[in-house]
Amino acid sequence: MPAVSFQSVSKTFSTPRGPFQALNDVSFDIEEGEFFGLLGPNGAGKTTLISILAGLARASSGRVLVQGADVQADYAEARRRLGIVPQELVFDPFFSVRESLKIQSGYFGVKNNDAWIDELLESLGLADKAKSNMRQLSGGMKRRVLVAQALVHRPPIIVLDEPTAGVDVELRQTLWQFIARLNKQGHTVLLTTHYLDEAEALCGRLAMLKQGQVVALERTSELLSRASGNVLRFKVDGELPAALQAQARVTGRIVQLAVHDAADIERSLALVRESGLVVEDIEVRKADLEDVFISVMAGSRQAGQEVAA
Ligand SMILES: Nc1ncnc2c1ncn2[C@@H]1O[C@H](COP(=O)(O)OP(=O)(O)OP(=O)(O)O)[C@@H](O)[C@H]1O
Ligand SMILES: [Mg+2]
């Protein structure tokens, strides 16, 4: 039985400007023990999908099962199996960190949870903030508390909606070590992030959402191997010729193009030079998940292979 099963999930919001479809027939399963990444640009529908999984929003059609429990029909059962770290920083300002974790434990009917709460505080670098009022914490610390809150009842499935947004490098590493350890112990992890290097390093399998639809669903290694392999990177002093612009990833003066082989590199550079531009700082690097992501989002499902063709 899958840990999570999304079955033809669609969601339409009614807005002042009429209906808006945020999710369109999303189907995929996450198996027990997987470290699964859900990627997509802003507004792709990631948080909407997680809200439906968490029972906070209702799907317009389709259904979601958590270890077989329907999130609508069997809400309490499904919710107990999930630990959800929300994207938004929501917290109760009147309690201390430890109190809020005790309250959250009580909410799930977990008693005598102090040892685990101590371990969570320790693992997330919050031990010295246990007595601090939630109001007194910085943004990154509040996010750590949200992670701790999600885990107080030792849920088998951990859902993290951009847990590292606004979090410093050190905590990011601590957090990932901790989550990776829980995953090794058998917890299933569902993660959304805009840090594609994190997704590449951590997730065994990925789904990419674009405008509410799944446009890629594969093992991370498969996705990476489908990328063309290499990326040509250089600086130019002006606008790229149209033939290259559509395929290039441009950041200021820096241009990056997927390339297969030496002939490809020569062809691309020749095109740039023919247009009268000066090319500087040429280098070739291996394609990474960001390259794949960009080409998938550009509409090429072949992820990189067609970019330079
Ligand atoms: N309550 C709502 N009413 C109307 N539209 C909504 C509502 N919630 C979300 N949307 C719209 O649905 C789309 C998907 O939003 P969602 O928050 O799921 O995106 P996301 O993939 O999580 O993006 P981000 O990476 O920015 O967090 C967006 O266009 C958003 O404006
Ligand atoms: Mg979101």
Image: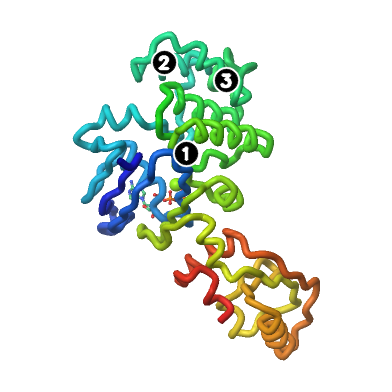
**Measured Cα–Cα span from mark 1 to mark 3:** 18 Å
Q: Which residue position is annotated with label 3?
A: 121
- Number of other residues with Cα within 10 Å of mark 1, as a class: few under 14, some 14 to 19, many 20 or more: many
Question: In the image, is residue 187 above or below residue 236?
Answer: above
- Inspect the image, locate mark 3, and give the three-letter code of the amino acid beneath it: Leu
Q: Would you identify the image quadrant in which residue 2 lies?
A: top left
Label 2, secondary structure: give it.
helix
- Inspect the image, locate mark 1, and give the three-letter code of the amino acid beneath it: Leu
The answer to whether marks 1 and 3 mark residues whose Cβ atoms lie closer than 8 Å is no
Q: Can residue 145 be seen in this view?
A: yes
Residue 273 horizontal side relative to residue 212, left or right: right
Residue 124, given in percent of the width and then of the height, sits at 59, 26
In-front residue for pair 296/146: 296
Q: Would you identify the image quadrant in which residue 227 lies?
A: bottom right
Question: In the image, is residue 137 above or below residue 6?
Answer: above
Residue 175, given in percent of the width and then of the height, sits at 59, 33
Residue 275 horizontal side relative to residue 229, left or right: right
Residue that appears at 35% across and 30% down: 81
Q: Can residue 20 be seen in this view?
A: no
Q: Which residue position is annotated with label 1?
A: 160
Q: What colouring method underlies this structural image?
A: rainbow
First in sequence, mark 3 or 2: give its number.
2
Whether label 3 lies within 8 Å of ligand 2 gets the answer no
Residue that appears at 56% across and 81% down: 309
Whether label 2 lies within 8 Å of ligand 2 gets the answer no
- Numbered label attached to residue 266: none
Q: Which residue position is annotated with label 2?
A: 103
- Number of other residues with Cα within 10 Å of mark 3, as a class: few under 14, some 14 to 19, many 20 or more: many
Label 1, secondary structure: give it.
strand
Residue 89, given in percent of the width and then of the height, sits at 49, 33
